[in-house]
Amino acid sequence: MILSIAAVLFTFGLVIFLHEFGHFLVCKLTGIRVEAFSFGFGPELFGRVKGDTRYSLRAVPLGGYVKPAGEELEEGTGQPYEYFAKPWHTRLGVVLAGPFMNYLLAFTIFTGVILIVGEPVPSTSPVIGEISQGYPADAAGLKAGDRILSVDGVPASDWPRMAELIHKKINAPITVEYQRAAEKTRVEIVTKKGPEGQGLIGVAPGMNYRYIGVRKAVKMGAYQCYFWTKYTVTTLAGNIRHHQKPDISGPIGIVNIVSKAAHSGMSDLFFLIALISVAVGFFNLLPIPLLDGGHAVLFIFEGIFRRKLTARVMGWVNSAGIAFLVGILIFATYNDIVRLLPKKAAAPARTEAPAQGK
């Protein structure tokens, strides 16, 4: 329990704090006065004023916040150090600095983990290394460590062969025979259509690791940022194109995943932190009102049409953003709760005892 709590606080604190630190740093570099810079939320435990900024440590260490002078249009007095007194491209730099820091954190962690642990190489053995929550294999009761013996009666000699057999069946039942310890079990699973149109049941192979040098680790760290961003875009686009409900996690789901990663090892935890940092950076770049991406769109339009934003427009935009984000939060939390509800396991078709040698 203590390890799980510490991992959650560390993960959220690091990812969100560095996001806010990006905003803070660019404000300072561009001459925008920062009135408050806080680590955490809630009641202030310790605070100190240095220059024009009050730095504080607060009771809930889940991120932080930055308050630039004149960040609300109606509060502006026209002073040159205020946020909205700066040109649009300066404000654009401020809002983009948060997601940039998330990607920088992810790149640093990916590179470090790969350098220390080594390059992950998928095992070719048909042994499940990971199960995706909410997917058919999870619902059918399969677990990490199970060895897939056959799919629809066809022997699964290795992982690529097994994957080929599953990919061919889209939204269709397949019979999977697997071995767990000394028991062989056969179960029927209905595949799910993946983002690239292939059949999936939600299993991933185990990983082997081999040492690589710094140069390749850096390249692979950068590629991980690119890959997971592309994967997110592809998945969301596929959901929209095929009219599928997006499979997103909210705070409950993320806390559950972080807790499991903390107990599986430090490398898994830090890799997950990098994934979450990419997700936070990407999400904040979306052109949604109230997010960094939404503000960026407004500032770009301001630069193109050379018309200053008004308090009325910002009020409308922020109100729409709040409503949209609350809707996403409710939807994601509902998904989290559904995943946590007990699942009715599929009944195995047949169980065989292992053959006894004589």
Image (cartoon, rainbow, N blue to C red):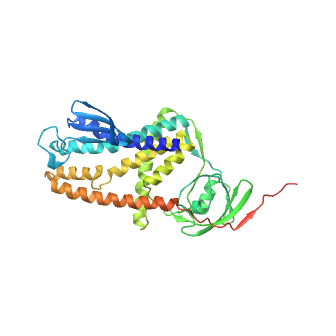
Task: Classify residue 232 by image quadrant.
Answer: bottom left
**Relative image position of residue 230 (x, y in whole percent):** 42, 52
Which one is in front, 148 or 63? 63
Which one is in front, 109 or 150? 109
Tell me if 297 is positioned left or right of 357 in this view: left
Residue 336 appears in view: yes
**Relative image position of residue 241 (x, y in whole percent):** 40, 66
Q: Residue at x 51, y 42 (%)?
A: 269
Residue found at the far top of this picture = 50
Q: Residue at x 53, y 57 (%)?
A: 133
Tell me if 183 is positioned left or right of 6 in this view: right
Residue found at the far left of this picture = 78
**Relative image position of residue 172 (x, y in whole percent):** 57, 70
Task: Classify residue 37 by image quadrant.
Answer: top left
Tally the marks: 0
**Relative image position of residue 70 (x, y in whole percent):** 18, 43
Q: Residue at x 45, y 61 (%)?
A: 335
The C terminus lies in which quarter of the figure? bottom right
Residue 223 appears in view: no
Tell me if 249 is positioned left or right of 40 in this view: right
Residue found at the far right of this picture = 358
